């Protein structure tokens, strides 16, 4: 993240992510679970994919998935 955002923004983004985790733990009083964060990261990735597909379509391109190698 540092190379993409720069050092200051990377620290801020990391602090923000930690703050969201702590807020969730305190507000729900549930134990920490990596699966909850993985789920929301997955949703964010899906939203990014949809956004990129729309941007490509606006430029006249159609994205197709690369087939996974069978190994």
Image (tube, helix red, strand yellow):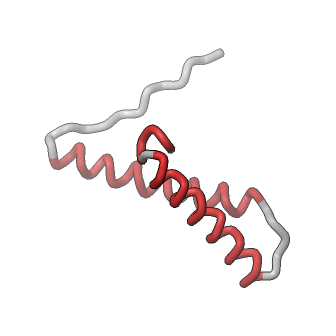
The residue under the point 82% across, 76% down is 30
In the rendering, at what x and y percent does residue 41 appear? Answer: 58, 56
Answer with left or right where residue 66 lies relative to residue 51: right
User: Residue 60 versus residue 9: which sits nearer the camera?
Assistant: 9
Tell how many labels: 0
Q: Is residue 21 left or right of residue 60?
A: right
Residue in the foreground of this view, choosing between 69 and 28: 28
| Left or right of 34 on screen, residue 31 | right
Residue at 49 percent across and 43 percent down: it is 2
Residue furthest top in the image: 71
Residue 19 in picture, x, y percent from top left: 63, 70
Quadrant of res 32: bottom right
Residue 57 rendering spot, x and y as whole percentages: 21, 46
Residue that sits furthest to the bottom in the current view: 27
Q: Quadrant of residue 68?
A: top right
Q: Residue at x 45, y 38 (%)?
A: 3
In this image, 51 relative to 41: left or right? left
| Residue 9 point in image, percent of width and height | 45, 54
Viewer-side residue, 36 vs 61: 36
Residue located 65% across and 15% down the image: 71
Where 3 sits versus 43, above or below? Answer: above
**Looking at the image, which residue sits at the far front?**
8
Q: Is residue 19 above or below residue 53?
A: below
Q: Which residue is situated farthest in the right direction here?
A: 31
């Amino acid at each position: 993240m540092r190379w993409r955002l720069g050092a200051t923004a990377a620290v801020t983004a990391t602090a923000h992510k930690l703050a969201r985790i702590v807020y969730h733990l305190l507000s729900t009083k549930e134990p920490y679970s990596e699966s909850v964060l993985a789920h929301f990261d997955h949703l964010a990735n899906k939203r990014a994919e949809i956004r990129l597909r729309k941007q490509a379509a606006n430029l006249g391109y159609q994205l197709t998935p690369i087939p996974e190698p069978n190994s």
